[in-house]
């Protein structure tokens, strides 16, 4: 695959790339660059983490990227997830990996690594200390978005440690690229700023789009808007989970906002663009004959145009999106229903209290 084709694939993932010039140079000089992705095991997994992450990682792998995926169990512990119970956090980590396996993530090109193993290495803590020594407390607090928190919600001393660890992770994993969501941007920029001064390198940052949740968009247009918009498991009715039933998916989507002729921050349009059209070649909108009959749409641009013009009713779009999302979730749901070990694993983590 030539450089231009690889770049095009990666740009489909990256809503922002820091910087495209550095990425091109990396692709020219290294056949299989290493990308870092990390996840905090903090409860059940929704479609943004399950389906969208699978789509993005598989595209990057197709472009020749090798992944090191960090199970950030100690980070979740520092962030008081699952009530601060490390054993429960690690159980959730195992569950997430199994969901991605059933989602079709290309696991043969991914190394899953656990922070629990890193912490036994003095060299890791040296990197964490270097990051901390070269950062002010205020600078670290400003990265709170990576934990799903506003600056004022940084209350525990352990939460100061978290960004220092995540920044150090990039260098400990010898990652050329960080491939995370836009909500992780601040700590990735910190790594770029500190890299050379710490004797390391400046990683390329590829930040993917954050899928919006099913709630009403916030009125405030502040720097924390991304946290308020994104799909979050702390409000189950505003997220679609990978083991939700068909009825649950339809119910949640039925309650969700979908303002007529509005495409910005509209979850139904977002799911169509970032999920449905990635899996299906067309979307069929089922309609009664008196409303124009069934409509087959071949690409997202056409869907957006028709919706903006008011030629597709919100209820019809909701019904279509619910159908296709259910089709994408169904293989995972069926696998967990049929396999007794997976079923027990899911039942176990469903019994855990999700904490912020």
Image: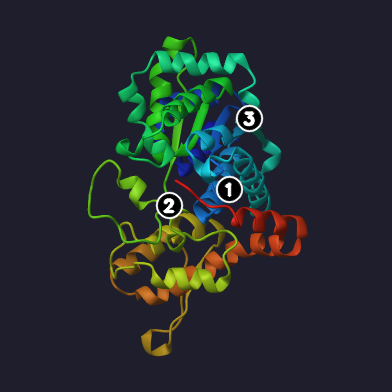
The residue singled out by tag 1 in the image is 54
The answer to whether residue 344 is seen in the rendering is yes
Corner quadrant of residue 191: top left
The residue singled out by tag 3 in the image is 116
Q: Do the residues labelled 2 and 1 touch (CB within 8 Å)?
A: no
Residue 352: x, y in percent? 58, 52
How far is the residue under mark 2 from the one under mark 1? 13 Å
Q: Residue furthest bottom?
A: 290
Q: For numbered disc 3, what is the local secondary structure? A: helix
Q: Which mark, by number, is residue 126?
A: none
Give the number of the mark in front: 3 or 1: 3
Residue 27: x, y in percent? 54, 26
Q: Give the camera-side residue of 81 and 297.
A: 81
Q: How many labels does the image show?
A: 3
Eyeballing the image, is 285 above or below 144? below
* N-term-proximal mark, 2 vs 1: 1
Horizontal side, residue 111 vs residue 309: left or right = right
Q: Which mark, by number, is residue 211?
A: 2
Q: For numbered disc 2, what is the local secondary structure? A: loop
Q: Which residue lies furthest to the right in this view?
A: 340
Corner quadrant of residue 279: bottom right
Q: Coloring scheme of the render? A: rainbow
Eyeballing the image, is 83 above or below 219? above
How far is the residue under mark 3 from the one under mark 1? 24 Å
Bin the neighbour count of mark 2 within 10 Å (Cα to Cα): few under 14, some 14-19, many 20 and up: many
Q: Do the residues labelled 3 and 1 touch (CB within 8 Å)?
A: no
Residue at x 53%, y 49% (from the top left corner): 49
Give the number of the mark in front: 2 or 3: 3
């Amino acid at each position: 695959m030539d450089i231009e084709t690889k770049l095009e694939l990666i740009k489909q993932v990256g809503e922002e790339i820091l910087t495209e010039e550095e990425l091109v140079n990396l692709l020219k000089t290294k056949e299989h660059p290493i990308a870092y992705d990390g996840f905090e095991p903090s409860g059940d997994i929704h479609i943004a983490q399950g389906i969208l992450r699978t789509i993005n990682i598989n595209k990057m792998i197709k472009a020749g990227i090798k992944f090191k995926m960090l199970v950030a169990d100690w980070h979740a512990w520092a962030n008081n997830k699952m009530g601060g119970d490390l054993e429960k956090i690690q159980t959730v980590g195992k569950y997430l990996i199994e969901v991605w396996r059933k989602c079709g993530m290309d696991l043969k090109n991914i190394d899953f690594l656990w922070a629990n193993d890193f912490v036994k290495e003095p060299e890791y803590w040296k990197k964490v200390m270097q990051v901390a020594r070269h950062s002010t407390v205020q600078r670290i607090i400003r990265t709170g978005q990576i934990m799903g928190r506003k600056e004022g919600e940084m209350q525990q001393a352990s939460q100061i440690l978290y960004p220092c660890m995540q920044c150090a992770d990039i260098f400990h994993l010898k990652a050329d690229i960080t491939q995370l969501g836009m909500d992780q941007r601040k700590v990735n920029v910190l790594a770029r700023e500190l890299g050379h001064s710490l004797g390391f390198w400046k990683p390329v940052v590829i930040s993917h789009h954050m899928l919006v949740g099913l709630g009403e968009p916030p009125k405030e247009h502040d720097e924390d808007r991304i946290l308020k918009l994104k799909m979050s498991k702390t409000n189950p009715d505003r997220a679609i989970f990978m083991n939700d039933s068909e009825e649950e998916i339809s119910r949640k989507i039925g309650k969700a906002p979908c303002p007529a002729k509005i495409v910005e921050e509209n979850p139904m349009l977002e799911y169509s663009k970032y999920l449905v059209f990635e899996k299906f070649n067309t979307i069929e909108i089922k309609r009664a004959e008196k409303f124009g009959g069934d409509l087959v749409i071949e690409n997202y641009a056409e869907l957006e145009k028709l919706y903006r013009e008011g030629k597709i009713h919100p209820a019809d779009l909701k019904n279509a999106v619910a159908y296709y999302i259910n089709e994408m979730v169904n293989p995972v749901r069926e696998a967990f229903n049929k396999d007794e070990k997976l079923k027990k694993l899911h039942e176990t983590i469903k019994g855990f209290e999700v904490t912020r």
